[in-house]
Amino acid sequence: SAGPRPPGRGGGGGRDAAAMRAATSEWRATRCAHPGRASGSRSRPGHGGGRHEPARPRRGWRSAGRGVPGLEAAKSSELGESSKGESSKFSSRWMNVPRVAYHGAPGAFSSLAARELLPECEPVACETLELVTESVAQWRSDLAILPIQNTLEGTLHDIQDRLVSCGLHIVGEVNIPVIHCLLALPGTRKEDVKTVLSHSVALAQCSTLLKGMGSVREAVFDTAYAAKVIKAEGKTDAAAIASKEAAEEFGLEVLAEDVHDKERGQNIQRYLLLARDPMEYDAVSTYKTSIVFTLDEGSGQLFKALSVFALRDMNITKIESRPLRANPLLATGEGAPTQFNYIFYLDYIGHTSEIKCQQAMRHRESRDEHRRELGETT
């Protein structure tokens, strides 16, 4: 549309900080003014509408510390000398408080994962997975965090497919324990609970508790949202399965803690951090790269595709296959049985900027029908 362009989207990376601030102020005054904001706060409207302050341009993520996209803490003097190097493990060349989009309500496990990676981030709640990735692609948020694997449930395939289609880059990951709690309004007793609300997966993970209670299960889109509903509707005969942080967020009491089915093992969830730009390469760090590929039809194609890693002593940490949705059946010739056509997800140790990884990918070009890199983490 016509009108002045926001600063920082057209290659203005060479401006100094003062020029950038002046240009941003001028652009806000002409097109993006948001009255009522506190002085010195970031001028961003709510998630639901309006225009947002454009993020400053960057050339890629730089890793630091634990090796997720490095958002280094730009600490102000008011934190004191003792806090330097302790309150954050991450660095940023362009922002102090990154906005991280996640699926759910405040207190969701995804928001806890975001704060585990980036203690100083501003979590942005989104009601759908589409809004999570669109929030980053449309510059409403700086990063997105999504769950990808769970020790009890395995891979979350809908989210895995979204990694291929959303156009964002994996730049970090974190594993956090999922500690389900039974939450209710203050004064509600466990024996008074007739209905339990939570995400369908959380309800399944706590089936032993729910069978003993004899309660009706009601699935909602997020665990923390279940706590929000209990509070908003004043349900005195209902409870939610969510995090302890969700109880604090919505003023609920914890009736029981760590209620998942223990016989199934530990409940740990892996999350991926996504950004518009790939992570910058640092020769000192060790990287893990995620790729997705398909194969031509024929004998030994998968063995040949994987051999390029073994020949270079490259470690594969994960490989997984799923039937292709767009082209599920593979033509195998007349008289041959019909077979599924698969897409492969693979993680290996290395970075695409390293010589041996480049050689391996060139070697693979003759093996793969299609291939795409999803991103790198450290």
Image (spheres, grey):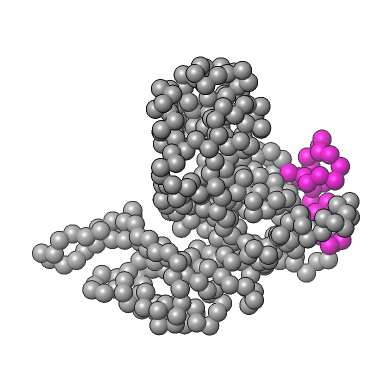
Can see residue 323? Answer: yes
Residue at the image position 39 percent from the left and 64 percent from the top: 319
Does the segment drawn in magenta span residue 144? no
Can see residue 3? Answer: no
Q: Where is residue 339 drawn, in percent x and y?
A: 21, 60
Q: 319 above or below 269?
A: below
Residue segment shown in magenta: 17-44
Q: Where is residue 24 drawn, in percent x and y?
A: 80, 54
Residue closest to the eye, 344 or 117: 117
Does the segment drawn in magenta span residue 29? yes
- Residue furthest left as drawn: 335
Q: Where is residue 97 drawn, in percent x and y?
A: 74, 51
Q: Where is residue 362 drawn, in percent x and y?
A: 44, 80
Left or right placement of residue 337 versus residue 28 in this view = left
Left or right placement of residue 112 versus residue 373 in this view = right
Residue at the image position 55 percent from the left and 19 percent from the top: 189
Residue at the image position 58 percent from the left and 37 percent from the top: 243
Q: 3 above or below 259?
A: below
Residue closest to the eye, 336 or 284: 284
Residue at the image position 64 percent from the left and 43 percent from the top: 124
Residue closest to the eye, 30 or 226: 226
Left or right placement of residue 205 versus residue 71 in this view = left
Tally of numbered discs: 0
Q: 323 above or below 262?
A: below
